[in-house]
Amino acid sequence: MEKFDVIVIGSGPGGYVAAIRAAQLGKKTAIIEKYSTMGGTCLNVGCIPSKALLDSSEHYYNITKSVADHGIIVGDVKFDFSRMIERKGEVVKANTTGIEFLMKKNKITAYQGVASFENSNTLQIALSSGEKISIQGDNIIIATGSKPSSLPFIKIDKKRIITSTEALSLKEQPKSLIVIGGGVIGLELGSVYSRLGTEVTVIEYLDRIIPGMDDDLSKELQRVLKKQGIKFNLSHKVSEVKADKNKVVVKALNKKDEEISFEADYCLVAVGRKPYTEGLGLDKIGIEVNKLGQIPVNEHLETSVKGVYAIGDVIKGAMLAHKAEEEGVFVAETIAGQKPHIHYKLIPGVVYTWPEVAGVGYTERELKDAGREYKSGSFPFRALGRSRASGDIDGLVKVIADKSTDEILGVHIIGARAADLIAEGVVAMEYRASAEDIARMSHAHPTYSEAIKEACLAATDNRSIHS
Ligand code: FAD
Ligand code: NAI
């Protein structure tokens, strides 16, 4: 039986990064992936394909809606939906084969098959060929990720009632689409189709969209997406979803308990994801998942079984690729005897709509609930030269700082390139900068990043220069 220092189950951003870091640290490492391509949810049916379609649909939207304002006259603009989907596939392939290359480069043994525990240091792999083999590891890292979740009364038929996975590979552009869930997936994929001309209707249980983000961002995003054509039904409780060959009917109760009926070509169910542990044989080693289906871990991300670790979507915390990556590095370094650290509050969250939305640290709602004294400063993009030049004037930056020390407690951005801008907030908070520290740093002009400086000026002493 082949023996390894470290075996990783799952090749998503948690698993493949853990494997590379373990190999860098001199560990004999293996990785097991049940699918024929590496990269997990993120590369195959998550982050990468969704961003490819967001970029394609954004080009189309801009050509049809905003370039005329720049004096660019275009003729009859059409799009080829199947080419968009095909291109997305090419982008995915380039990324997944890149991971295969990285496995080889780092001399990581890769198995394609389903892994399950025989005992705490032995795994059986049901290889794609049908053969079963066993391998042993001193340390095993579970990085099996997550799957879309649904509501108990909804039957996902994958034809008309779909999850994000199917929404990324539709054969036709829907004329109309109901999205259940105004969270990250619902709004990103809702944006893709809305930009292409699909009539998109969002049904959200809560009274706001993107509930994990600061309330000001959620209000502003709703305002802008509404302007782009997406219809919102907040505080609606879905009660029934039924499909026939050609359409879907969704029933929901509004605030007044009245039943409203919606009809569309397709219904995307985007109400969250659940950890994936099926077939792993956790019972064989005495690991019990919690009520949410997550594998419980301690502060070293070790499970109740010594030498068995778990990372990424399968454990508690944000279901984000970069969180999984940090945990992959953390566990590999822990196994190698190092003392790594993850500052979970400084893991940024991003929504890749346009405008993009990004946040790090505490939201105002969290600080209010915790009774912490704070001050905040905002700056609207429409007051920024760079935004006026490009035409991206929607959105704002909000910086929240401790009332007495001025230490930055949260940075929240909705606007052009927020996804990239948020890195400044992360660096500032990692080094425990005050709002005034950032306000006194030179920010190149004209750039979108000046909005962060201005919001810091506003938070420092209400002394923003340009608003
Ligand atoms: P996964 O990526 O889910 O990988 C787990 C892997 O384990 C899978 O390949 C699975 O096949 C394999 N596996 C499971 N069980 C076994 C077994 N028994 N044996 C062998 N292999 C097994 N996050 C972001 O940060 N940014 C984004 O822009 C973003 N966009 C997203 C868009 C969509 C549509 C979706 C669905 C998700 C998105 N996410 C995004 C979330 C991100 O994809 C996940 O947080 C991330 O993939 C989690 O990584 P992971 O390594 O924990 O698990
Ligand atoms: P989510 O948690 O972001 O949003 C789910 C939404 O559905 C919430 O607004 C919730 O209130 C709503 N909801 C729940 N039950 C409902 C019901 N019965 N009726 C109507 N609405 C209901 O989950 P989502 O969008 O499915 O994404 C799953 C995970 O994938 C997220 O945790 C996210 O972190 C990750 N992801 C990250 C992306 C990114 O980083 N850009 C992109 C896409 C996904």
Image (cartoon, rainbow, N blue to C red):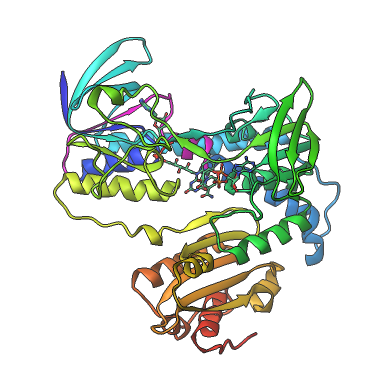
Q: Is residue 9 above or below residue 437?
A: above
Q: Image quadrant of residue 168?
A: top right
Q: Quadrant of the N terminus?
A: top left
Coordinates of residue 243 in the picture (x, y in percent): 74, 24
Q: Image quadrant of residue 133?
A: top left
Return the residue found at the far top. Answer: 130
Q: Is residue 154 above or below residue 431?
A: above
Coordinates of residue 230 in the picture (x, y in percent): 75, 50
Q: Nearer the viewer, residue 136 or 366?
A: 366
Q: Residue at 41% x, 84% y: name it.
A: 404
Q: Is residue 36 magenta?
A: yes
Q: Residue at 69% x, 73% y: name it.
A: 389
Q: Is residue 356 above or below residue 383?
A: above
Q: Is residue 456 magenta?
A: no
Q: Residue at 52% x, 69% y: name it.
A: 364
Q: Image quadrant of residue 361?
A: bottom left
Left or right of 340? Residue 425 is: right
Left or right of 261? Residue 427 is: left
Task: Give the quadrant of ligand 2.
Answer: top right
Q: Quadrant of the C terminus?
A: bottom right
Residue numbers of the magenta segment: 25-46
Left or right of 460? Residue 235 is: right
Q: Nearer the viewer, residue 462 or 190?
A: 462
Q: Residue at 77% x, 60% y: name it.
A: 67
